[in-house]
Image (spheres, rainbow, N blue to C red):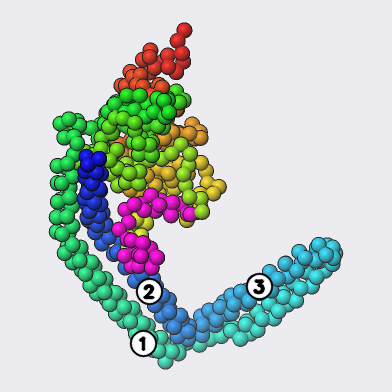
Amino acid sequence: MAQKTETLMSKAAMRRIVKKRDKAYDSLVFNEKYPGVAEALIDQKQGKLYQQRELKARKKLLPLEIAALPVPERHQVLSERGLADLRKSQELPRRAVEQTYQRKLVKSGPAEADRYRGGALKRLDAQAEAKAAELAAKYSIDAAGAADSGAVERFSQAEKSELAALAALRDAQQAEKTRRMDAIRARIAAQKPKLEAAFNEANIKLQAAAKLDDAAFGKDNIFSLRNLKMYFSGIKAVDDLSFDIKQGEIFGLIGPNGAGKTTVFNCVTQFYKPTAGEIFYRDRYGGIVSLTDYKTPEIVKVGISRTFQNLELVYWLSILDNLLVGAHGFYRANLADQFLHTGRLKREEEVFKERAIGLLDRLGILQYKDMPPFGLPYGVLKKVELARTLMSAPRMIILDEPAAGLNDAETEDLAAIIRSIRDDYQCTIFLVEHDMNLVMGVCDTVCTISFGKMLAIGTPEEIQNSKVVQEAYLGSE
C-alpha cells in the first residue's frame, strides 16, 4: 500500500513539473510569435483609421474642387452627379413596382399585372425625363466661363491643409506604433530569462527521471512500442506487439479488418490503458517519455496529434474555429479570461488565428475559413482535419484511415499533402490505411499485423513480396 501511494505521489509530482515546463515553453513560443502579430494588428487598425480620415478629407474637398473648375467642366460634373443621384433615387421605387407586379400576377392575373407595371414604370420614366431635362437646362455644358480665381485659391488652401493633417496623422501613428512595439519587445525581453530558467529546471528534472536513456531508446527513433498487449475480457486485440518509428519517416500499419490497428492507436493516445507493455516517445523537448504515464488530454501536449476514422468536426463552428479547437490545450488564458474575454485571451487568439490561416492557405482551403463544415466536399473536410492536427505543432501525427471515402484524385492529392506535411513541418507520420496504393506510395516503412500480432515489417517492396502477408490478406491455397 505504501509503495502504491509513493508511486501515485511521484506521478503527481511529475505532472506538476510537466505543467510548469509546458507553461514556460508555451509562453516562450507565444512571445516569439506575438510581436509580428501585434505589428500586423496595429497596422490594420491604423490603416483603417487613416482610410476613414482620408475619405473624410476627400468628401470635404470635393465641393471646393468642383467649384474651382471652369464653368463647362463644373456644369458637366454637376449634371453627371445629378443624374447618378436620380438613378439611385429610382432604384427602390422600381424594385417595389416589380414586387407588386409579382403579387398581382398571382391575385389578378397577367393582364391586370401587366397593366399596372406598364403604368407605374411609365410614370417613373416621365419623372426621370423631367428631372434630366431640368438638370440639362440648369447645367448647360455649352456655357462659357473661366474658373473662379477665389474658388481655386480656397480649394488649394483646403487641399494643403488636409494633406498636412493626413501627414501629421501618419507621423503620429508611426510614433505610436514604435512606442507600443518597443513596450511589447521590452516586456518580452524581461520575461525571457525567467521563462528559460523555469523551463530548463523542469526539463532537467524530467530527463533525470526518464525510464529510458537515449542509447536504449535508439538515437534516430521518435517512437517505440515494446511488447504491447491489449486484452478485452480475454480477447487479445493486441498481443505482444513491438516496433520502432524513426524521426521523419512515414510509417504505415496495415492488416485485415479486426487486426487491432485502431486499438494500437487508441493505446498510443491513451484512450485505452494497455494491459501490458510500454510505449516510449521522444517528446517535443527531446526527452524520452512513457506515454502510459500520461492522461488522454495530455498526449497532445507531448507532441502527438491524431485524426479519426470518421470526421470529428464541430459542425456549428466555422472552419477557422474548428482549427482553433485544435489549439485549445495550448492557451495560457484561464477560465476567468474566457468569461471576461480579457486582452490576454484576445492576444493569444490572434496568434492562433494567424497560425490557422497560414495552415488553411498552405492546404489550399483558405476560401472556406468562414464557412461551417455543412455541405462542403468530403475531401475539403479531410484537409480541415489535417490542418487541425497541425495547430498543436506536433512532432508526430497519427492518421486513422485518412483516405476513407475519398476518390482516386483526392487520394493522390492526399498522398502529396502527407509528404509535404512531413517535409515542411518536420513531422513523423504514423498511419493506418486500407488503400494499398496510398500505403505503398507514401510509406517508408510498413508493419503488417493480424489478430494483434506482427506478421512482417519492412519497406513497401518487402511487404508486397512477403508470403506471410499475402496469406493473411488473400488466404493460403
Q: Nearer the viewer, residue 317 or 18?
A: 18
Q: Earlier in the sequence, mark 2 or mark 3?
A: 2
Camera sees residue 446: no
Question: Pointer 3: what residue?
Answer: 92
Q: Residue furthest bottom?
A: 150
Query: Is 329 colored magenta in this rendering?
Result: yes
Question: Pointer 2: what residue?
Answer: 49
Give the numbered dot on residue 278. Answer: none
Q: Earlier in the sequence, mark 2 or mark 1?
A: 2
Q: Main secondary structure of the magenta part?
A: helix
Q: Which residues are magenta?
A: 317-345
Badge 2 amino acid? Leu
Q: Secondary structure at mark 2?
A: helix
Write the residue at 38% across / 63% down.
Answer: 338
Badge 1 amino acid? Gln
Write the residue at 41% across / 75% down.
Answer: 52
